[in-house]
Image: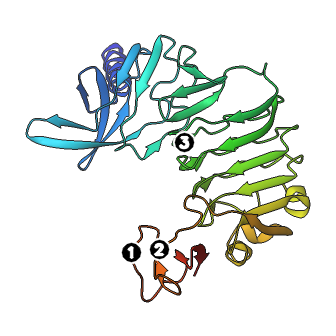
Amino acid sequence: MRRFYRLALTAALFMLTAHAYAYDVCVDGIYYDLNGNEAIVTNNAVAKCYAGKVIIPSEIQCGTTRYAVTAIAPSAFEGCTQLTDVTIPASVKTVGENAFRHCPLLPVHDMLYYADTYLVGPYECSVTGTYKIKEGTRWIANRAFNENMCIRSIIIPASVESIGKEAFRCCDFLKSVTLNGNLEIGQDAFNGTTTINEVKVYSEKTPTIINEDGAFDEQVYNTAQIHVTSGSRDNYKNTYGWRKFAFLSEDLPLAGIKSVLVPNAVGKCYDLEGRSVTTPAKGSIYIKDGRKFLK
């Protein structure tokens, strides 16, 4: 019987150790899981192993095989209290839940914590007013501003690809939201924030809303004024998520080039690269007689 228990204990310890070191490879001090020809940044699951500045490469090589670094796993850097900075390559497409949670030494810009192009959240609720996310930011973390009582308005640049789940949930004093690009709005991103009275969308394409029943609060859908760019109102009225808003007005100028003057170009159509177009494609932006228009 004692031998049985010893074997069982040995097996349990082996499984615990195997789980603790649940990564595939370690290259230059960074741990990765491998999936096909892709590498996902993770950790060694034993200690909060990352400190100082970490530079994530766009690819790694193991033996003769090269792997593109395409993601950062959930909680990969969570609790790394000595992590001071991180560089995230353009090859990374997704950042997992709580990837940089509880990393207090990360850089702060205009009272916001950043892990390179990933907005972690506000430094502290001490500054009341408008928060402008810095240019070049690609992601806003899940619950980044959840229940934040200081934010009054938020300006999100065109570089942002996605707003995380519940990122601005229950921000009781948030009144104005400005979006500047074709981004993805995560589940319940603004749900519970009933004070929003205007949303400005400077995008020639409608941003993607993951769940229209919870992206914004029902009260906001029924009362807020949505401002979109000239010629795009019908697109919004017929697009999932945006179709729920009761008040839509196309009173914003199109971003980028406002007009163009070309000699002997009256009546001719050009794309945004200045190339002459004979048959404009539906849903694209063109310039004709010095003005932009949406086909």
User: For numbered disc 1, what is the local secondary structure?
Assistant: loop
Query: Spatial distance from mark 2 to mark 1, Cα to Cα?
Result: 11 Å
Q: Where, by quadrant of the figure, is residue 248 drawn?
A: bottom right
* Amino acid of disc 2: Val
Using a 10 Å C-alpha cutoff, classify the residue at mark 1 as few (fewer than 14 neighbours), some (14 to 19) or many (20 or more).
Answer: few
Q: Please state the horizontal and vertical placement of residue 18, each as a whole percent of the image.
A: 32, 26
Mark 2 lies on residue: 262
Task: Kindly give the residue lying farthest to the front in the view shown.
Answer: 263
Using a 10 Å C-alpha cutoff, classify the residue at mark 2 as few (fewer than 14 neighbours), some (14 to 19) or many (20 or more).
Answer: few
User: For numbered disc 3, what is the local secondary structure?
Assistant: strand
- Frontmost of labels 1 and 3 is 1
Q: Please state the horizontal and vertical placement of residue 288, each as a whole percent of the image.
A: 55, 79
- Circles 2, 1 touching at the beta carbon (< 8 Å): no
Q: Please state the horizontal and vertical placement of residue 29, each as a whole percent of the image.
A: 28, 19
- Residue 169 appears left or right of 265: right
User: For numbered disc 2, what is the local secondary structure?
Assistant: loop
Q: Please state the horizontal and vertical placement of residue 91, each as a whole percent of the image.
A: 34, 44
* Amino acid of disc 3: Trp
Q: Residue at x 68, y 71 (%)?
A: 240
Viewer-side residue, 107 vs 256: 256
**Badge 2 or badge 1: first in the primary sequence:** 2
Q: Which image quadrant: the C terminus?
A: bottom right
Mark 3 lies on residue: 139
Above-or-below relation of 212 to 194: below
Mark 1 lies on residue: 275
* Amino acid of disc 1: Arg
The color scheme shown is rainbow
Viewer-side residue, 4 vs 173: 173
Q: Which image quadrant: the N terminus?
A: top left
- Residue 103 appears left or right of 1: right
Using a 10 Å C-alpha cutoff, classify the residue at mark 3 as few (fewer than 14 neighbours), some (14 to 19) or many (20 or more).
Answer: many
Q: Where, by quadrant of the figure, is residue 140 drawn?
A: top right
